[in-house]
Image: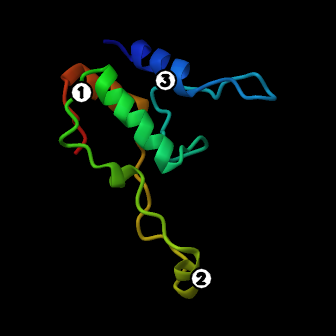
Amino acid sequence: MTDDDVIAWYNERFNKPGMFTKTRWPVTMDTSLSTGNYVWASETGAEIMKEYFERFDVESAGFDFYRYWPVETFLLYALLTSGKDDDEPEPLTLHMLAESARAGVWLFG
């Protein structure tokens, strides 16, 4: 299992060309699924990770989904408080997926 295997899987399954631009997002091993310019909603993040664990036969026991996609704050709460979201998502990169796939277990718990 190589870095290119993870990138190829991600591009094939989740990085489809845009409807109007017909191009894909730029993807490297540092691409984050949960932070940055190309963030996935938590529902899609759950789908990606479910498929990842099955496809690459990675034990998911140490994976904390909410570390990367925290429960979102309600708008009213954000307006009545400082407005800062206490639970900022951590980056979940393709590098992390590749390293864990090589190990067969989630390494970043």
Q: Is residue 80 above or below residue 6?
A: below
**Mark 1, residue position:** 58
**Mark 3, residue position:** 10
Say left or right for 76 vs 65.
Answer: right
Q: Does residue 46 show up?
A: yes
User: Could you tell which of marks 2 and 1 lies nearer the N-terminus?
Assistant: 1
- Give the secondary structure at mark 2: helix
- Give the secondary structure at mark 1: loop
Q: Residue at x 47, y 49 (%)?
A: 42
Query: Where's the C terminus, which quadrant?
Result: top left
Q: Are marks 3 and 1 in contact (CB under 8 Å)?
A: no
Q: Does residue 34 show up?
A: no
**Mark 2, residue position:** 79
- Give the secondary structure at mark 3: helix
Say left or right for 49 vs 10.
Answer: left
Query: Where's the N terminus, which quadrant?
Result: top left
What amino acid is labelled 3 in the image?
A: Tyr
What amino acid is labelled 2 in the image?
A: Leu
